[in-house]
Each structure stands twice: as C-alpha cells, then as structure tokens.
Image: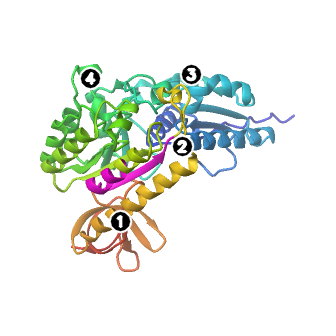
Amino acid sequence: MKARTLKKDKVNIITMGCSKNLVDSEVLLTQLKGNGINASHESNSQDNNIIIINTCGFIDNAKQESIDTILQYVDAKEQGLVDKVYVTGCLSQRYKDDLEKEIPQVDAFFGTRDLPAILKKFKADYKHELVGERLLTHSAHYAYMKISEGCDRPCSFCAIPIMRGGHISRPIEELVKEAQHKAAGGTKELLLIAQDSTYYGLDIYKKRNLAELMRQLSDVEGIDWIRLHYAYPTGFPMDVIEVMKERPNICKYLDIPLQHGSTDVLKAMRRGTTREKQEELIHSIRDMIPEIAIRTTLIAGHPGEGEKEYQEMVDFVERMKFERLGVFTYSHEENTHAYSMEDSLPQEVKQERANHLMEIQEQISYDLNQEKVGKTFKVLIDKKEGGHFVGRTEFDSVEVDNEVLIDASKHYCRVGDFVNAKVTEATEFDLYAEVVD
C-alpha cells in the first residue's frame, strides 16, 4: 500500500485598507516564514489552501469591500478550493461577535493585536528576534514604517480607537534597528506612518519626541528619503519642521489631515482647534520651508455642516492652496461620538460637495504643476507601466500624489534608482519629464 502524502499548507494573506494594515500583513508574513511556513501575500497561485484576510473597518465602503472578500473566500471554501479562512484586522476587531454569527464558515476571527493567537493556529511561535525585520510586499526601494499603534484622540467621526486601541509608541532604538535592516536590504525611502504621528513618544519619553526620532532615522546610512504621514495638527511640534529643514534626507513633505475649514464643524468633530489656528499653523510651516508640499484630507458632510459651513471649507481650500488634497464623504459610524448626531445630509449631497472641492483642487494642482515646467527634480523610479517609467519627487508620496512620467522609448531607468529629471509638461496630477545628467 502506498503511504498517503500530506499536502503541505500554503498560506495566502489578503490585505484590505490602509498602509498601516499592509505593515501588519508584512509582519505576519515575516513571522510565518520565520517559522518555516509557506506563506505569500496576495498570490495569484491557485494552490493556496489557507487564506488570512486582513480587513478594514474604517468607513462603509471599506467595510463592504472587506465583507465581500470574506464571502468570496468562504464560497471558495464551500466549493473545496480552500481548507481554511481566517479573518483579522479592523473589521474583525470591531464586529467580531456579529461576524461570527453572520459568517460562521470562517474558521476564526482575530483582532488587530492578536498576532500571537494567529501564529498559534499554525503551531508557530512569535519570534522576537524577527522584530524590526519585515518582508516587503512591494518593491524594496521604499518601506512603510509604523512608528506607533492606536490613538488617544477623541475625534467624533473616527472609529480607529475602537479598532486599534490606545496610543502605543515604538522605542526609537527599535525603529532605528528596523531602518538599518531595511537600508541593508535596499530600501531608500522610509514612509513614517501612525494613527497620529505627532503624538509619538509621549507614552515612552513623557514628551513629544517625533523630531528626535526623525533625527536618528536620518543618520541611518543608505536612507535617502524620510517622509512623514498622518501628523495631527493640534499641538503640532514645530521642532519637526526644524529637523525637516536642516536634514536633506527628510522630505520637504507633510501629510497633515485637517478634516474641515469651519470652526463650528471642527468643534463638532472634537478636533481641539479652530480654522484660524489651522491657517496660522500652515502659514508658520510654509514660512519655515517655503518649498514644502502639504497634503491634507477633508471630510464633506459631517453632522452640523450646513451650506454656510460648507462654503467656509470651500473658501479655506481656495485660499490655502494645498499642494495635495483628498476629500472623503462623512460615514456615520456606530459607537463614535458623531453617531449620536443627526446624519441629515443625503449621500448624493455629500458626494457633490466632495466632487466640487476636488474640482477646485484640480485647478490649484494644475497651476502649481505648471510652475514646475522647465525645472529639474530628483526623482525616485517606482515602476515601469505601459510606455513610461513612473517615479516621484520628494514632494509626492506613494500611490496618493503626483507621478513623474518618463518616456521609456527615449530613456532607460532602473526601478528603485534616483534620476535627475527635467519637467517638460504638466497636467493636474502628472508631470512629464526627461532624464538629464
């Protein structure tokens, strides 16, 4: 009689939502592989028999996308195409009990801080020696670095503290070690992320310590760019801008979500600031670094946003001329402070307002981009797509900002390399350039 050979498990991790989730998936992937388990991230291979879905639970669209993905793999399980489906991440943290009742075919649900419990399912151990090491799921030349977890802010519209818990900073020495490891593996750009990066260090060092972290990271050999994301405006530590100004490898770029341009709505949002204070902060930052690119996000349709408050936000966008802007429509999230307020605006009105703000931004972005024509910039090449090499300047982050397009029939560029590129033409969100010596 022939002995039956057991098929070895192959794990596929699917990531929904933001870059913070992507980091969690990369950590999980690293731990699984470190335990000798065959694991991949969003593999197209048909022979993965265990699926781990890292979900997003932030707003309605993201929740629906996560649920659709779970149902897709549950269906595959019922057809015998996969053996097990595990669900982790924000949606699972927030709605675990409901999900267990509604989708009992899922083998187990885990929260956002349940990595050891997931590993236990694979009879694997959490390997402390792998802290700071992370297998990247994209080109190695850039890497997201999560400097803290959770959030202590009371923003009315946000469910992040429910899903991610309170703020916990990672120690500077641990982050420096991770940066050194990344640099050794070919990473040239670090994108610093957190739920609230300006709160960094308060829990460990009893003071805001983001500037010191950035200073130490900028000393790591091989890291050419450090980019700061998700800086909360209230109590913004201006020493961060001083470090940005003095260190050439810290990008003159700041992602600072302001959320609204009306003081009354900011108060309803519990943001702890006013329109005037936000404008003053932006002016101060631009006074210190005139060339800085400021990215912000706004929410259209929060409870309390009447026509007057909306027009204040329109005026705010027109006058502040942000280099980068994203606009979301308000999502009425249970267990948030705003859930007790009346969500009276129809979705189509919220969407019209968001679209109108983005139309204004398109013209602002077009005008700012025209000023770049004829100028030469240092560009990091991210990929080749169609007939172009696609890269970014220091003023642009991955996937959300402007791209630099270089004609591949005229120039050869290596992905992950820097080139000097002269802008020849510009549209609202793209720069066309030629490589120069």
Earlier in the chain: of badge 4 and badge 3, it is 3
Q: Secondary structure at mark 3?
A: helix
Q: Which residue is mark 1?
A: 363
Front: mark 1 or 2: 2
Residue that sits furthest to the front in the current view: 308
- At horizontal 33% and vertical 36% (from top left) the residue drawn is 178
Q: Which mark is residue 202?
A: 4
- Foreground label between 3 and 2: 2
Query: Marks 1/2: CA distance?
Result: 27 Å
The segment highlighted magenta reads 313-330
Name the residue at 31% across, 50% down.
Answer: 316
Q: Amino acid at mark 1?
A: Gln
Q: Measured from the top left, where is residue 417 in percent x and y?
A: 31, 61
Residue receiving disc 2: 345
Q: Earlier in the sequence, mark 3 or mark 2?
A: 3
Extreme-bottom residue of the structure: 410
Q: Is residue 401 left or right of residue 336?
A: left
Q: Amino acid at mark 4?
A: Leu
Query: Which comes before the other along the chain, label 2 or label 4?
Result: 4
Residue ID at (39%, 27%):
151
Scheme of colours in the image: rainbow
Instruction: Give the residue pinned by disc 3.
Output: 117
Q: Residues within 10 Å of mark 1 (few under 14, many from 20)?
A: some
Vertical comparison of 368 with 352: above or below: below
Q: Viewer-nearest of labels 1 and 3?
A: 1
